[in-house]
Amino acid sequence: MKKIQISPSILSADFSQLRNEIKRLEEGGADMIHVDVMDGHFVPNLTMGPPIIKSLRKFTKLPFDVHLMISPVHKYIKDYADAGADIITIHPEATENLAVSIDHIKSLGKKVGVSLNPESKINLITDLLNQIDLVLIMSVNPGFGGQKFMPEVLEKIKELKKIRDQKNIDFDIEIDGGINFDNNKLAIEAGANILVSGTTIFKNNNGDIKKNIDLLKSS
Ligand code: DX5
Ligand code: ZN
């Protein structure tokens, strides 16, 4: 079984303190930093872009797990690579040619993630799975932190895991949205090995990040 990793979303952090918040995540045992990039077009919310990622890059060695909820995404990929992203995750619906965008991310020396919304089917990516480092399964409709977990996406994770075993290929399965201390076990049992979490990590137990990360990892 793959090691369980936690990718805290800084969408729930105190934006006026991002540098310190990242330090707290690092000290609390985060495995990477999830950065939610939203454009007010692909999703109905606006967050942050390359300059913020670039300005934070020097303050941590943790990988930046950059989730691009922007459309059209292709022409902006290089900006995120240059800013210091380590994993660049895109949505199939946000690019004219998914295979070309995947190649572009790889050519920049970055890990490739592809994200499936709750409504999006696995067959959008089946033929490309051997090119992908990570599949990000959305367990809420993207756009906002603090939404309710949609358990029906667990089936998709089980199916992905099955395909991975059958085809004998290797990619991570990450889950994003509404993860808490009740459903973390379900996600891990289904086959997810990277859990994204914003609200649970920053708001539970009076913001005790270490405790919350430890609790999310234990299943
Ligand atoms: C939603 C984002 C998620 C979200 C996670 O569009 O992709 O990363 O912020 O936050 P919680 O854990 O609060 O659902
Ligand atoms: Zn995300």
Image: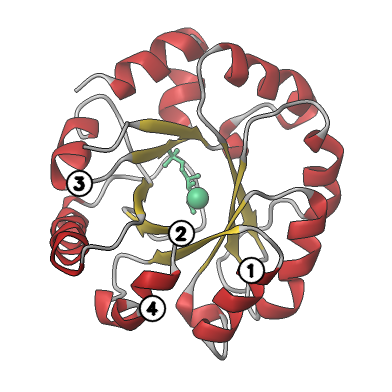
Give the quarter of the figure containing the C terminus. top left
Q: Is mark 2 within 8 Å of ligand 1?
A: yes
Task: Using the numbered discs, state the Cα–Cα distance from disc 1 to disc 4 in whole angstroms.
Answer: 14 Å
For disc 2, the marked residue is: 142
Q: Secondary structure at mark 2?
A: loop
- Please provide percent x and percent y for residue 81: 74, 58
Left or right for 187, reference 202: left
Label whose residue precedes the other's in the sequence (1 or 4) = 1
Q: Report the residue at 41% width, 26% height from top.
A: 200
For image coordinates 21% across by 56% down, the residue present is 157
Q: Which residue is mark 1?
A: 105
Q: Secondary structure at mark 3?
A: loop
What residue is shown with label 4? 128
Q: Nearer the viewer, mark 4 or mark 2?
A: 4
Tag 4–tag 2 contact (CB < 8 Å): no
Distance between the alpha carbons at the discs numbered 4 and 3: 19 Å
CA separation in Å, label 2 and label 1 = 22 Å
Q: What number of labels is visible?
A: 4
Q: Nearer the viewer, residue 4 or 92?
A: 4
